[in-house]
Image (cartoon, grey):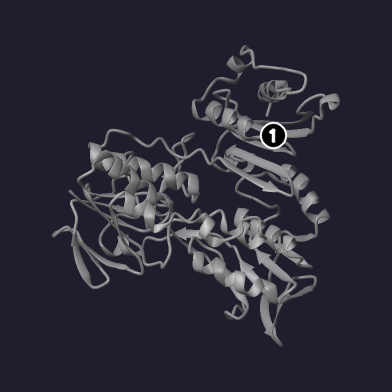
Amino acid sequence: MNVCIIGGGSSARTAAGRIRGLNQRARINLFSKQAEIGYAPCEPPFVLRGRIARWDDIFYSGKYFEERNIDLYLNTEVTDIDRNKKRIIAGGESYPYDKAVLCLGSMPFIPPIPGLDGKNEYTVSTNIADDKALEKIIPRYTSAAVIGAGAIGIEMCLALVARGYHPVYLLDMLDNILPASLDKDMADTVEQVMREKGIELVMSAGIKGIETISGRKHITLPDRELEVDFIVLATGARPNVELARNTGIEIGETGGIAVNQYLQTNDPDIYAAGDCMENWSILTGDKIRNLMVTTAGITGDIAGRNLMSGNSLPYRGALMTFVIDIFDHQIGTVGFTEKAARERGLDVGSAATTALTARPLYGGKPIRYKLIGDRKTRTLVGAQVISEQEIQGTINELAVIAAERIPLANLMAIDFPYSPPVGRETLVKAIAGLLSGLKASK
């Protein structure tokens, strides 16, 4: 069997590894137009920050692919797919396939801000070249503005603060950081910490224009002007679907490649995975974009399995789980924000609770929950957690509770473990608070 994988990100690497594990004789060709692949796209800010010493430390070396007998073609762009003859055209050569996987990734989205001229303006993406360009210029300057208060924008601010930058501005057109993951009442807690650490937040930023004057960038706002050495555009991404569209692959309503539950496209011999595919919510079935490395890995694995096993494993959808560390505060989320749930027409209630992870005598730290529940089903559709202590276990629990639609009342009868130095009864109290809120009138 000949398998062609187009793309070099997490979904491509995972799909290739799964296919090889299931079939030792298949010929696997992996094509990427980039010069380097195989890195974890969430790790470059840690190299820029200095917490990881070298770029090589975050890469899967060529040995990874060699050991698995995967033919890797770098700097090789796939320009066409002949679906009738089942061949792809890459680097001017033709390659046959029996099955193919589109792992085309995403492309940076640059908003139409007046005055952008490409001078001292840098984008961040899944292309490591963007991050290496930033590495070269960071030592030359001392001030910057990051536009886009999502996870990548925040990570870039953290890197710049760690490198001694002052000022560091973080701007976003919406009214709080991490708008896809946090409601404003929860974001306020983290925003205060960021301000105390030297990041100047400019939310609801109505950027009127940007101008380059004497080599410096001037950002015009309704009430003032910011002057910095350079700008980082972390303004989101869009699925990269041009190749798919040009070859007759169906594009879904959110702009990603339409797939069925087995991640097949409208061509049964071509699958799609990762950022380029149209995702859907495991909670509601609504079509969504979910450009996350975790989702890329999961869908790459499932596409690889189904390609080899005849569609044996359906993909259930994305839960939109998320976690980030901001100045030693861990923020984790599951499912919809309250705002997003209401926008989707869900009748929801919410409850916010602040408690200690353990008694003060045992070094407990505050932990803040916001839980969002569906009034009709009495199940969890969203959760937001902030603490200075480890929250991964709590987020994992909440993810299972939401994904499996466990009735909240049932959770009150489970004997969650407790020990004075460990705590853990705080989650039960948060769930009890949510149940009370759901019973109240709208």
User: Is residue 285 found left or right of 303 in the rendered image?
Assistant: right
The answer to which image quadrant residue 45 occupies is bottom right
Q: Please state which of residues 232 and 5 is positioned toward the viewer in this rendering.
A: 5
Q: Relative to 375, say whether 383 is above or below.
A: below
Q: Relative to 423, say whether 91 is above or below.
A: below
| Residue sitting at the far right | 361
Q: What residue did someone put label 1 on?
A: 370
User: Is residue 203 found left or right of 362 in the rendered image?
Assistant: left
- Can residue 53 be seen in this snapshot? yes
Question: Could you tell me residue 211's position as x and y percent?
Answer: 67, 81
The answer to which image quadrant residue 161 occupies is bottom right
Question: Could you tell me residue 349's position as x and y percent?
Answer: 65, 30
Question: Could you tell me residue 388's position as x and y percent?
Answer: 75, 39
User: Is residue 9 found left or right of 77 in the rendered image?
Assistant: right
Q: Please state which of residues 176 and 418 is positioned toward the viewer in this rendering.
A: 418
Kindly state the secondary structure of the residue where label 1 is placed. Answer: strand
| Residue sitting at the far bottom | 214
Q: Relative to 83, say whether 130 is above or below.
A: below
User: Is residue 64 found left or right of 332 in the rendered image?
Assistant: left
Q: Residue at x 53, y 28 (%)?
A: 400
The answer to which image quadrant residue 147 occupies is bottom right
Mark 1 is on which residue type?
A: Lys
Q: Residue at x 46, y 35 (%)?
A: 282
